[in-house]
Image (cartoon, helix red, strand yellow):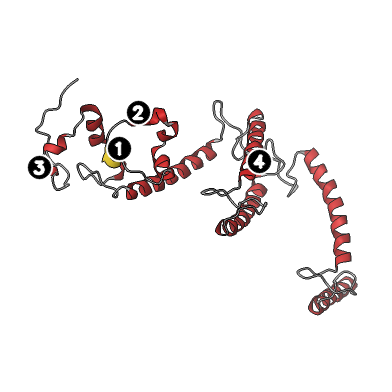
Amino acid sequence: MSETTKNLAAVQRRYRRLKQEGICITCGQNPAEKGILKCKTCNDRHLKLAKKGNAKRYLARKAAGICTICGQNPARVGVLTCEICNNRYLARYNKHCKEQYSKRRAAGLCEGSCGRLAMPGKVHCAECARGMSVKTRKKRAKRRAGGICTYCGMQEVEKGFKMCQGCRLRTNERNQIRTKKLRDEVFAAYGGCRCACCGEIRAEFLQMDHVDGGGAKHRRDDPTAIRIYHWLKKNNYPSGFRVLCSNCNWAYARYGYCPHQDEGDYQDGNAHQGASTKSSPVS
């Protein structure tokens, strides 16, 4: 056995012995701190040296235009890391954030680290919400000026867009899922996913209707009502609304009545199978 192998085996035996006894593996004298293998003095000295060395390495990689984490791949446009390292970091960071946010949300606290109570129906306190809005606007303005995606900050954007293609697709998919969930909640609050006139049950054809009309005036008086599903949920599902299919809703808006009212096939809520026998007025 070579001298190097003997020395390595001795170091490994010392490491295992000190670790088992709870002694600092560096100095071999002081008790190790809880959760680490070194005493406080040795750990502080190691962190100080590591921070100094890391700073030099970070600046050298930044000047060379390579990833400041792995030091191998070229850094992306406008950022300091490669795509592989960034995705790996985001996966760990998002997992940690979700765990922390869930705990704070369950306790009714702001999702930030301030420890204050969240606003009613919100996930942040008023102060954090204002600070985040200012910070987000500055960050997006900087990215927009640099010609990169304002959402991920990684990819270059096409002319006329603020987000890269990948972020646009993910955002659209997420918005569609969120909108469908909200729409189903609103329909359930007004009797379920079923037209109140003809009995149509396919959600793709259904929409909300003002029972007494006046939808245009409602939107003029309250511009937020243009997002009708959000408005209804925010106002605790007030009366005066119902679920109608597009055909029935248009007939009521255009003619003031729906031909289904005079057709026996719709008296029991069954879908009409034949053509309407009532002629509609033509404007």
Mark 4 / mark 3, whichever is N-terminal? 4
- Which label belongs to residue 131? 4
Label 2 element class:
helix
- Which label belongs to residue 209? 1
Mark 4 / mark 2, whichever is N-terminal? 4
Q: CA distance from mark 4 to mark 1?
A: 38 Å
- Which label belongs to residue 216? 2
Instruction: Count residues near mark 2 (Cα–Cα under 10 Å), then give few for <14, some for 14-19, many for 20+.
Output: few
Q: What amino acid is labelled 2 in the image?
A: Ala
Look at the numbered discs 1 and 3 and tell me whether their residues touch, using CB distance below 8 Å.
Answer: no
In screen coordinates, is 209 left or right of 58?
left
Q: What amino acid is labelled 1 in the image?
A: Asp
Label 3 element class:
helix
Residue 93 x %, y %: 64, 53
- Which label belongs to residue 264? 3
Q: CA distance from mark 2 to mark 1?
A: 11 Å
Look at the numbered discs 4 and 1 and tell me whether their residues touch, using CB distance below 8 Å.
Answer: no
Q: What amino acid is labelled 3 in the image?
A: Gly
Residue in front for this viewpoint, 228 or 240:
240
Q: Nearer the viewer, mark 4 or mark 3?
A: 4
In screen coordinates, is 97 left or right of 254?
right
Mark 2 / mark 1, whichever is N-terminal? 1
Q: CA distance from mark 4 to mark 2?
A: 36 Å
